[in-house]
Image (tube, rainbow, N blue to C red):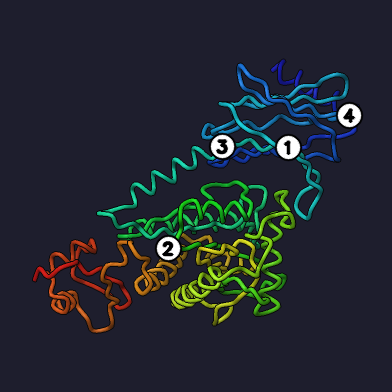
């Protein structure tokens, strides 16, 4: 108790004399980095030093006081062990970040925006070696008799410092998109010949470019970005599906949405102007043309699946300059699952039952596309059959001259009941 009072008195004495106050310290742990954000009342001069034995990062901030206790990192944090702060040389503040291992770091100041005030950001990250090891492990698991899985990269929009839009009940877009992404990933993992990669796995900030680069590292065959935006009119509702536009947005609303989503990097302290052509140029090469054609085809099939679950905001695929879709070599689609600003849509987004229905609808669109355009060398490139009304498992087995048992086994079916629209893999060879 005496220590607690001593800490309070120390914080009060420091805050009385320092020009700048640290109102909060927020920690966001990602698989390949940790971000520490100091919410400050004004810009500061600071210096960062990396010390060894043990590894620790010392942050000295001039004429600044800490007016509250520091939040500690979680046990799952791969980089940060503990954070401690103390006064130094009069009115200066020293914060020590105890590290679990050697790490690279960077620091920068952010100006206020419509969500936060002044911020000092410390990023702690590693080399790409560990992430590459994860990629290679997935690649090794993805091959079955020299035929690979189709890789679906599922991107949950926003995260960490960037909560995205919010609903009337206070639901954050970053939370529902992550929930949706995880549900969809589980469904994809259950499909033979498919593998899911979650681009954002937890509540942390990711640059738009990082999302594209992660999908590329995993050699994704499809990139799906999941969102749940808001609009100034709470009556606006429904789902929409977007692809990249190289010529301009298909509507003013699409343009407004794209500008809003592209601003996410500015919230996290990233500008797009100084990046390479992946994000800077909309006029992409011929490979982008082929990718865009595939994106449109996939988007149409996903839209057809979604409209069976709920209301659509637009009955057709929309196009806009979303930065997160600007990968020249991966077909990419952005799904606005609903408008979180609409009370009914917000309730649906919070519902696990609705999330499951929506994920199933998206999966149907994905499966339909890859049943027609399976990549060479993939398991899905083997014979496929899309069930039409009136067909049964036995008639399909007779049509392809395979046994009912082999058809059941290769598709992991527990019964002979099938539904129109399902895609079956036909076993190779005649065994009937």
Q: Which of marks 1 and 2 is in front?
A: 1
Residue 155, x across and y down, in percent: 53, 57
- Which is more toward the observer, 421 or 425? 425
Please state if 266 lies on the left or on the right of 336 as rendered.
Answer: right
User: What's the mark number on residue 18?
Assistant: 4
Is the Cβ of the residue at disc 4 closer than 8 Å to that at disc 1? no
* Residue bearing mark 1: 107
Q: Distance between the residues labelled 4 and 2?
A: 52 Å
Please state if 114 lies on the left or on the right of 167 as rendered.
Answer: right
Q: What element carries label 1?
A: strand
Please state if 304 lies on the left or on the right of 430 as rendered.
Answer: right
N-terminal label among 3 and 4: 4
Is the Cβ of the residue at disc 1 closer than 8 Å to that at disc 3? no
User: What's the mark number on residue 127?
Assistant: 3
* Residue bearing mark 2: 356
Neighbours of disc 2 within 10 Å: few (<14), some (14-19), many (20+) = some
Residue drawn 67% across the image and 65% down it: 281
N-terminal label among 1 and 3: 1
Please state if 223 lies on the left or on the right of 165 as rendered.
Answer: left
N-terminal label among 1 and 2: 1
Q: How far apart are marks 3 and 4 (CA)?
A: 37 Å
């Amino acid at each position: 108790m005496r220590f607690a009072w001593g800490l309070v008195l120390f914080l009060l004495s420091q805050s009385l004399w320092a020009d700048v106050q640290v109102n909060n310290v927020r920690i966001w742990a990602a698989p390949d980095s940790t971000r520490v954000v100091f919410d400050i009342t004004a810009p500061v001069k600071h210096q960062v030093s990396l010390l060894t034995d043990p590894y620790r990062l010392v942050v000295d901030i001039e004429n600044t006081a800490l007016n509250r206790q520091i939040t500690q990192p979680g046990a799952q944090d791969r980089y940060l062990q503990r954070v401690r702060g103390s006064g130094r040389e009069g009115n200066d503040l020293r914060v020590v970040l105890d590290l679990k291992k050697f790490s690279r770091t960077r620091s920068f100041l952010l100006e206020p925006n419509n969500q936060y005030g002044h911020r000092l950001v410390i990023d702690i990250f590693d080399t790409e070696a560990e992430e590459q090891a994860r990629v290679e492990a997935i690649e090794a698991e993805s091959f079955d008799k020299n035929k690979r899985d189709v890789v679906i990269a599922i991107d949950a929009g926003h995260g960490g410092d960037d909560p995205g839009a919010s609903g009337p009940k206070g639901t954050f877009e970053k939370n529902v998109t992550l929930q949706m992404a995880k549900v969809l990933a589980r469904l994809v993992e259950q499909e033979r010949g498919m593998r899911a990669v979650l681009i954002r796995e937890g509540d942390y900030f990711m640059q738009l470019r990082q999302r594209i680069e992660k999908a590329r590292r995993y050699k994704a065959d499809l990139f799906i970005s999941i969102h749940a935006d808001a609009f100034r009119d709470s009556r606006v509702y429904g789902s929409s599906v977007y692809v990249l536009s190289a010529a301009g947005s298909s509507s003013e609303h699409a343009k407004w949405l794209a500008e809003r989503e592209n601003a996410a990097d500015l919230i996290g302290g990233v500008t797009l102007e100084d990046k390479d052509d992946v994000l800077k140029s909309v006029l992409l090469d011929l490979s982008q043309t082929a990718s865009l054609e595939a994106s449109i085809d996939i988007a149409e099939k996903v839209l057809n699946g979604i409209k069976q679950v709920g209301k659509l905001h637009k009955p057709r695929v929309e196009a806009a300059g979303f930065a997160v879709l600007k990968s020249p070599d991966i077909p990419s689609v952005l799904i606005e699952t609903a408008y979180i600003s609409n009370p009914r849509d917000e309730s649906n987004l919070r519902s696990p039952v609705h999330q499951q229905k929506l994920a199933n609808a998206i999966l149907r669109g994905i499966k339909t596309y890859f049943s027609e355009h399976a990549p060479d060398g993939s398991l899905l490139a083997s014979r496929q059959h899309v069930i039409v009304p009136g067909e049964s498992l036995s008639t399909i087995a007779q049509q392809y001259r395979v046994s009912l048992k082999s058809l059941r086994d290769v598709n992991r079916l527990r019964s002979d009941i099938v539904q129109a629209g399902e895609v079956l893999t036909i076993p190779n060879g005649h065994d009937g």
